[in-house]
Amino acid sequence: MADLDPELCNCFLDEAKELLEGAERCFLDLEKADRGPAVFDHMLRLAHNLKGSAGAVGFDGLSKFTHKLESVLLRLKNGECSSHQKLISLLLECGDFLNGAVALLRQNLFAKVTNEELSLRLESIINCKICEKLKSGPPDAPQAGPCGFVHPVLDEEQFLEGERRVADVQKSRWTVSKSKEPERDDSIRVGLERIDRLMNNVGELVILQTGLSQTRHLLQSAVQFETVSQMDKIIREVQEITMALRLVPLSQTFQKMRRIVRDTSQAVLKEVEFEVSGEDIELDKNVVEQLSDPLVHLLRNAVDHGLEPTEERIRSGKSRQGHVFLGAYHSGGRVVIEVRDDGKGLDPRRLIAKAREKRLLSDEDRPTDEQAYQLIFAPGFSTKEEVTSTSGRGVGMDVVKTNIAALQGDVAIETTLGLGTTFRITLPLTLAIIDGIVVKLGTERYVLPLVQVSETVQIETGQISKIGETGQVLRLRNENIPVCGLEIMLGHANRQRPPMRSVGIIVHDELNSPHCMLVDQIVGQQQVVIKRLGHEVHWLAGLMGAAILADGEAVLILDVQDLLRRRAESQKCEQRNKQREAV
C-alpha cells in the first residue's frame, strides 16, 4: 500500500464509480421477467474489470471482495442458484458497500475497506455443497442449501446447457471481451472550477457584445457593421457550446430512482412496476445534483401515499401491480420531468380537513381544488396518521417545493380521484443564464426571473380598490388580487410612488394564489448571466443574485417567491401584535 500512485488511484476510483453504476443497473434488471443472458455477461464483465483494476493499483482488499462477488455472479449465470429477491438484495448490499469503499478511498487512499459479514455471506454461496452437487447432475426437487437460497430443479437439457456455459467460461475466461477492438475514448475529464471560470468569462463577453450590438448603428463603415454582426453570431455560438460543457444526462439520477422505488415498495409491501423514459435528456450538472432529493421524495410518496394496497387495488378493479412512471422531455427551451402513478389520486376535501386540523387553514378559508393540492407542499403537512420510516413527518414535499424553487423551476399537479396523480416539474437547462424581465422602480432597475411571472397588467384608474386601512386589491377578470408595491416588499416603505400609472406584475405564491406586484415601468425582457452575491449580503431576503446589463450597470435579480413568503410572514406577525395590543 505504501507504493500507491495517487494519480493512478484517482483514475481508478473515477472508473470504479461508473462501473458500480452499471452493476447496480444490472442487479435491478435481474428482477425483470424479460431479462436475457446479456445481463449476466455484462455483470461478470463489470465485476472482472473492477477486480482486476483494483488489484492493479494496489487496493487488495477491494480486489479480494470483488473476486468473491464475481464467483457468486458466475454461479448465478450457470443456474446454480435462482435470482430471487433475497439474492438480488444481497447483490445490492454488496454494491452499496463497494460504493462506500470507493468514497472512503477517495478521502484516504490508505483506508482499510472490509466487510466481514458480506464476505461470509458470499463465501456461504461459493462453498454451498448443494451447488457443488449440481456439477454431477440436477436435483430431483428444489433444495435449500446452507447458502440460504433455493436451488432450482433443472431438466437434463438445462443442466447440460449449464455445463457447457461453465466449460466455455473456464476455457476462454474473458477472451471474448479482450478480442474485441477497444472503443476509443474521445472524452477528457475537466474540473468544474475551470468550466465555471470559462462560463464566467464567456458571460462577460456576451455582455460586452450586447452593448456593442446595441450601438452598431452608430458605425459609419459597412465593413465594421458586418464584423460586429459576425462577432455577435460567433459569440452566441461560443456561449451555447460553453453552456453545453456543464450538461450531463439524467441517466445517473434516474438509475438511483430505480433503487429507491424498489426499496420503498418492499418496505410498504406493495408490488410496483417502475417505468423510466428520457434518461438521455441533459441538464446542468448543478441542476441534476440538486434534483435528486425532490425526486426521491416524490417517488417515495407515489409508492407509499399514491398507490393503494394490493387488496384495495384488486377490489377497485385495478391491476395487482401499481405503476409508477418517471420521465423527462424538452418543452419550450426548458426540461419537464414527470412523476406519475396510477393510484388513488388526491382528495381535496381530505387535504383541506387535514390542513384545518394542523391549523394551516382557518375555518373561514375556502380554497379551490387547485389551491388544496398545493397544501401538500406546506411545511409539516402530512396525511399519514402515524410516522413510519418512509413518510409521515411532513417534510418531504416541503423539500420538493423548496429545492425546485431554488432551481428556478416550478411544480404543477394534475390528479384525478381514483385514477392517479402526476407531478410535473419544469426546469431551466442551466442556472448560469436566465430569461428575465427588467423593471424600474424610481431610478433603480431590477431583474425578475421570467419563470416567476405569470403576466403583466397596465394599471388603469379605478382598477385598484382599498380594503381596510392599508390593504389594496386589483379587480382582474372578476377576481380580487392582493396588491403590494415592490418598494414595500423591498423594505422601502417611505418611498413615494411618482404620479404616473403603475404596471402590475402578476405572480403566484407557494399556494398558487395570485398577487399583484406594482412597479413603475417595465424596461424589457432579456437573458442575463447570474452573478453570485457574497456572504456579506446573504442575510438579505429575496435576492437571487446580480447581473450586469448591456450598458454595464450592475442590477439585483429578485426572488419573487421569497419576497412573497417574507411579506406573508410579516403580515402574520403584524396581526399577532395587534391582537396582543387589543387584549
Image: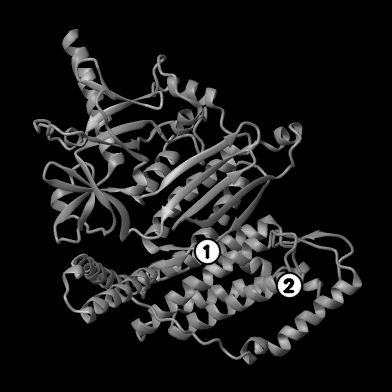
What residue lies at 55% left-to-right and 74% top-to-bottom? 66
Report whether 471 appears left or right of 162: left
Q: Nearer the viewer, mark 2 or mark 1?
A: 1
- Residue 37, disc: 2
Q: Specify the farthest residue to the top.
A: 583
Mark 1 burial class by Cα count in 10 Å: few <14, some 14-19, many 20+: some
**Left or right, residue 71 beside residue 188:** right
Q: Is residue 154 left or right of residue 201?
A: right
The percent position of residue 18, horizontal first and vertical second, equals 49, 72
Depth order, front residue of 133/373: 373
Q: Earlier in the sequence, mark 2 or mark 1?
A: 2
| Residue 533 against residue 58 in the figure, above or below | above
Percent coordinates x, y for residue 34 in the rendering: 75, 63
- Amino acid at dot 1: Ser
Which quadrant would residue 104 be assigned to in this image? bottom left
Identify residue type, mark 2: Pro
Q: Which mark is residue 178?
A: none
Please name the residue shown 51% across and 52% down the image: 337
Q: Are the residues at dot 2 and dot 1 in contact (C-beta closer than 8 Å)?
A: no
* Element type where label 1 sits in the image: helix
Residue 162 position (above or below residue 293):
below
Q: Which residue matches tag 1?
A: 251
Which residue is at the front of the view, 486 or 403?
Answer: 486
Residue drawn where x is 19% and y is 7% of the image? 583
Dot 2 falls on a residue whose secondary structure is helix
Location of the N terminus by quadrant is: bottom left
Of residues 349 and 468, the one nearer the viewer is 468
Residue 396 picture location, percent across and down: 44, 41
